[in-house]
Image (cartoon, rainbow, N blue to C red):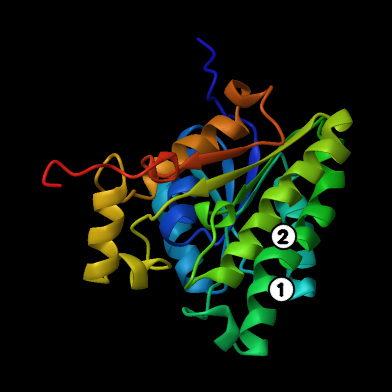
């Protein structure tokens, strides 16, 4: 019986896929039948993830890439085409945040790194990959954004700006490439237990505040984001485009009134 979530025969390129949300997405897409291109800066880490996917019966190809380097993004696309025959799904997950604090104190080089890696690199890679996705008859672009892109932040202001830009990038791709049967969406996670967000969830004060204010009273796990990515990549999401799907345990819906209050 055909499944709405079947990705058999599809090629999924996932940046930043050796840990956290990217790893969960790559693993789940492989479980649903996709050939996954595992990519991050460290070849050894990529190989370890690909080996585990293969050991579990999935298909994985390793193509390391530093997303801030345009020539490496070009190589990522070219090698994917050469080794996998095409691209059907592009998951843009890799990103950076080298600074935590008020925007007025952010060094220029940190600002350039955030905007370059989180926005410009996604723009570069999308423009490189989209014509090839169109040649396959269409497909799906998924950009991992953040609820930071929907809210102001006293500590993550520039990161939040970059993530708002990613939401707009998804909308623009949806409009420009929709006639070629390409869908583009963003996923905006709340606080998720990843190494990337460790400074937030390991801080006892921030952790207590977030879990107290969040309706589900906890932070998320990477696998809870992966399911939405599979949905957006598969037939189940075939009429969903130009959207930002928020997965945050209810944080942006409103704060909980504690029973102790």
- Report which quarter residue 2 is drawn in: top right
Q: Find residue 41 and report its horizontal and vertical position in percent.
A: 57, 73
Q: Nearer the viewer, residue 82 or 123?
A: 123
Q: Residue at x 26, y 62 (%)?
A: 207
Find disc 2 in the rendering and name its residue.
122
Residue at the outermost left position: 260
Name the element at disc 1. Answer: helix
Residue 202 drawn above or below residue 190: below
Residue 113 drawn above or below residue 4: below
Q: Find residue 146 and report its horizontal and vertical position in percent.
A: 53, 54
Find disc 1 in the rendering and name its residue.
116
* Crowd class of label 2 (few under 14; some 14 to 19; many from 20; radius 10 Å): many
Residue at the outermost front position: 261
Q: Nearer the viewer, residue 231 or 191?
A: 191
- Report which quarter residue 217 is drawn in: top left
Residue 84 drawn above or below residue 152: above
Q: Residue at x 58, y 29 (%)?
A: 8
Give the mark, 2 or 1, whose residue is nearer the N terminus: 1
Please give the count of numbered marks on the rendered protein: 2
Q: Is residue 219 visible?
A: yes
Residue at the outermost top position: 1
Q: Find residue 173 and report its horizontal and vertical position in percent.
A: 80, 44
Q: Residue at x 59, y 84 (%)?
A: 104
- Quote the CA–CA distance across marks 2 and 1: 9 Å
- Report which quarter residue 197 is drawn in: bottom left
């Amino acid at each position: 019986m055909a499944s709405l979530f079947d990705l058999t025969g599809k090629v999924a390129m996932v940046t930043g896929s050796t840990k956290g949300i990217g790893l969960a997405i790559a693993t789940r897409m492989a479980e649903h039948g996709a050939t996954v291109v595992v990519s991050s800066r460290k070849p050894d880490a990529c190989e370890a993830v690909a080996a585990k996917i293969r050991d579990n019966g999935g298909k994985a190809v390793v193509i390391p890439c530093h997303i801030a380097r345009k020539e490496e993004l070009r190589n990522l696309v070219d090698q994917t085409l050469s080794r996998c025959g095409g691209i059907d799904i592009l998951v843009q997950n890799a990103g950076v945040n080298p600074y935590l604090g008020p925007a007025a104190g952010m060094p220029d080089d940190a600002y350039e790194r955030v905007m370059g890696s989180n926005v410009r690199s996604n723009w570069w890679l999308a423009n490189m990959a989209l014509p090839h996705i169109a040649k396959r008859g269409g497909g799906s672009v998924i950009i991992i954004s953040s609820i930071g892109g929907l809210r102001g932040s006293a500590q993550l202001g520039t990161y939040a700006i970059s993530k708002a830009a990613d939401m707009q990038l998804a909308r623009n791709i949806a409009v420009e490439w929709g006639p070629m049967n390409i869908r583009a969406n963003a996923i905006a996670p709340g606080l998720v237990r990843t190494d990337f967000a460790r400074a937030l969830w390991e801080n006892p004060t921030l952790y207590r505040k977030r879990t107290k204010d969040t309706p589900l009273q906890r932070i998320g796990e990477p696998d809870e984001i992966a399911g939405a990515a599979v949905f957006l990549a598969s037939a189940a999401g075939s009429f969903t485009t130009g959207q930002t799907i928020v997965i945050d345990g209810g944080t942006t819906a409103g704060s909980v009134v504690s029973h102790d209050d």
